[in-house]
Amino acid sequence: MAKEFAKEFYQSDAWKRARTSYIKYRCGLCERCGGAGVIVHHKKYLTPSNINDPKVTLSFRNLELLCMDCHNKEHLAKKNTRYSFDEYGNMLPPVSKSR
């Protein structure tokens, strides 16, 4: 699911064209496992400060075609800093970064 700051970008004609072109460029195959690629992933993650930079958002150098499994592994490999749970499985409030 797209983050709020990126929703407009992902609905743009420029992104839709770049995404379609990149899938064709990669012959529809996941670049990691060779399966059916379904997600055009940004290697450098989009942020509010780079969302308007076409070198980040639209450049083939920053894109990677992934299957759902490889995309999930990519994001699960990153340490989860947004959510934590107590010993009963209850979600805890986010920890302030100023600590």
Image (cartoon, rainbow, N blue to C red):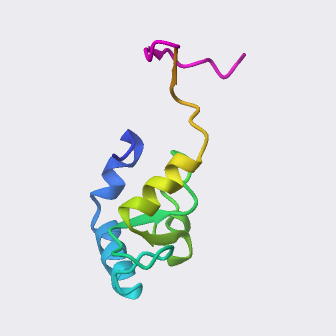
Residue 13: x and y, percent?
27, 68
Q: Relative to the observer, which residue lies in front, 97 or 67?
A: 67
Q: Which residues are magenta?
A: 87-99
Evaluate whether residue 51 shows in this view: no
**Total label count?**
0
Which residue occupies 61% across, 40% down? 79
Asked which quadrant contains residue 29, the reply is bottom left
Judging depth in this view, the residue of 14 and 70 nearest the camera is 70
Q: Quadrant of residue 14?
A: bottom left
Dominant secondary structure, magenta: loop
Q: Tell me: residue 74, above or below residue 81.
A: below
- Residue 23 is situated, as x and y percent measured from the top left of the image, at 35, 79
Can you give x and y, in whole percent of width and height, for residue 84 in the image?
53, 23
46 is higher (above) or lower (below) than 83? below
Let me know if residue 91 is in the magenta part. Answer: yes
The answer to if 19 sits in the magenta stretch is no
The residue at the point 40 percent across, 87 percent down is 25
Q: As drawn, which residue projects farthest toward the right? A: 99
Asked whether, in this view, residue 83 is left or right of residue 35, the answer is: right
Instruction: Look at 46% across and 62% down and name the residue there.
Output: 70
